[in-house]
Amino acid sequence: MARPREFDTDTAVEQAMSLFRTQGYHAASMPRLTALLGIGSGSLYAAFGSKDGLYARALKRYCDGLVESLDRELRAGADIRTALRGLLLAMVTADTAAPERGCLLVNATIERAAHEGTVEQVRTAMTAVESVLTEVLERARVRGELGGERSPVELARFLTTFVQGVHVMGQARADRAFLESAVAGALRALD
């Protein structure tokens, strides 16, 4: 008879996500993970299969939360410029307040570019971000909020790439004025 699990896997995934985000995959050693989670390595393996399994779950949670938050924030805005400006400046605020936290999606892309499972998770998340942006930009185009003949798909791809760049520059300790200026430039792409 299997013993009941002595820890909450959802809490463990959340805690591991935070450690992976600040330390990266490689620096988050098994001893560090098990100490943080308050469990033995056997329990970690039983629950997640491996460190890779735990990382995949943490990355999925992060990506799902990112897409849900993006969707919620952009749908709440009165117009596309106001919504995007608020979202991008909130990212700037978070990145400049705690640059060491970084973006798990950016970190995964860089640190685990040779790991096919991670690459696929990142690709899936970026496709979901692009899809959310394309949908809100298409609605904005129909409402006359986009200048000229702007393509919602092209703008969504630009913004998807721009957001990741903001996170990288935040980790590089770019100052707030620099990042705010970049946001202003990005919003001009909507004209």
Image (spheres, rainbow, N blue to C red):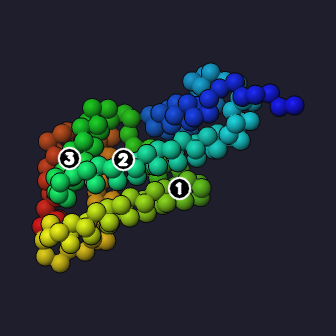
- Quick check: 136 left or right of 27? left
Q: Which residue is mark 3?
A: 86
Alpha carbons under labels 2 and 3: distance apart: 13 Å
Task: Indicate the position of residue 88 as horizontal and vertical percent values.
Answer: 24, 48
The quadrant of the image that shows the N terminus is: top right
Residue at 38% x, 40% y: name it. Answer: 102
State the residue at coordinates (58%, 44%): 57
Percent coordinates x, y for residue 8 in the rendering? 62, 29
Reading the image, the residue beneath label 1 is: 121
User: Image point 21% across, 52% down: which residue?
Assistant: 77
Query: Residue 34, how many percent across, how many down?
Result: 63, 26
- The amino acid type, in three-letter code, at marker 2 is Ser
Query: Which of 51 and 70 lies nearest the eye of the viewer?
Result: 70
Q: Secondary structure at mark 1?
A: helix
Label 2 secondary element? helix
Q: Quadrant of residue 101?
A: top left
Query: Quadrant where the C terminus lies?
Result: bottom left
Q: Residue at label 2?
A: 69
Residue 30 visible from this viewpoint:
yes
